[in-house]
Image (cartoon, rainbow, N blue to C red):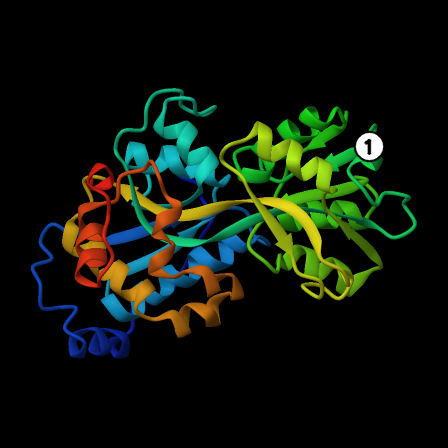
Amino acid sequence: MKMLIKTTVMTSAAALAIAVAGGAMAQDRSDWPSAISVGTASQGGTYFIYGSGWASLVQELVGISASGEVTGGPVQNATLVQTGDLEFGMVTMGPAYEAWTGASELLPVPHEDLRALFPMYQTPFQCIALEGSDIASISDLDGQVVGVGPAGGTPGTYWPRFLETFGVSVDVRNGGASDLAGQLQDGLIDAFCFAAGLPLSAFSQLEAQTNVVMFSMSADEQQTLLDAYPSVAAFTIPGGTYQSQAEDQMTVAMWNFAVTNANMPESLVYEIMQTVLGNHDRMMEIHRAAADTLPENHVHNGFLPFHAGAVQWFEENGYDIPDDLEG
């Protein structure tokens, strides 16, 4: 089931020297895989940048070959980690809950081997259209052709549901973030509704190349989704996030977590936790969304058990994990 496109950074002698100096090579690695892959999403989205970034950081500081892998997004990542086709993945908690409970659209059986690692950031939902298209709100999307991201991703899964909840009928187009941004610019779709950590690179690139309008939800639309979907939370996209967005915009968001399989070696998971959560400045260099990659945000996972290696790291660093979430 593995996807074919990868970004891999070869381990250098210098990086291995850093890892040895830091003590990461001291433990027994006999049960570690020779290499690890992190399931991300499409190129042009925050998942791809963030996931490939922390994989490279793990490779540099832990000394194991690691890469980010392009996938369809959280729905697919959850299943690929469950089946062992990926060692690690990144998920939003809506698709993760559906996978955990056996309601995944991809593999509708309980994903009982999924385990949580570290909190990443929140994924807010937002739309973009070309200036002059007369599209500047959710209701304006009715009857339009709308790109919503890959079919297995968070926006590709939830935007069609949200629009149906609003009573807005659209012709949905699936695709990667970069591809859909290009289709919008070429007039092949009327709007592009997505969800990713801020700022979304595909949106930033679009506004750098053409005049655009960014919009999200009214107060009533936001409340409608909060009432209908327990997996989302209220979110405000700050004005100035993009040059084309001067004012705050109300929307909803989902939290993201990194996940692995319950069978992943505890010592490897512990080292990854230490690398990501112990190097916040380096994570911020990867993507600004990592501002929320903080250990105290583990509380935003209320159902998925944490991997034993993650539990060890949290507890050694003063964070209590509830007994029912110790995996």
Percent position of residue 6, x then y: 44, 52
Residue in the foreground of this view, choosing between 270 and 62: 270
Residue in the foreground of this view, choosing between 132 and 106: 132
161 with respect to 38 (left or right): right
> Where on the picture, by quarter, is residue 148?
top right
Q: Quadrant of the C terminus?
A: top left
185 with respect to 121 (left or right): right
User: Which residue does the image show at 52% across and 34% down from the upper left?
Assistant: 152
Percent position of residue 308, x then y: 18, 47
> Where on the picture, by quarter, is residue 187?
top right
Percent position of residue 73, x then y: 49, 41
Above or below residue 164? Residue 148 is: below
Asked whether the viewer can see residue 271, the reply is: yes
Q: Quadrant of the N terminus?
A: top left
Asked whether the viewer can see residue 1, the reply is: no
Say what secondary structure mark 1 lies in.
loop
Residue in the foreground of this view, choosing between 44 and 257: 257
Q: Amino acid at mark 1?
A: Gln
User: Which residue does the image show at 67% across and 25% down from the upper left?
Assistant: 165
63 with respect to 257 (left or right): left
The residue that label 1 is drawn on is 144
User: Which residue does the image show at 44% across and 39% down from the upper left?
Assistant: 93
Above or below residue 323? Residue 69 is: below
Mark 1 surroundings within 10 Å by alpha-carbon count, few (fewer than 14), some (14 through 19), many (20 or more):
some
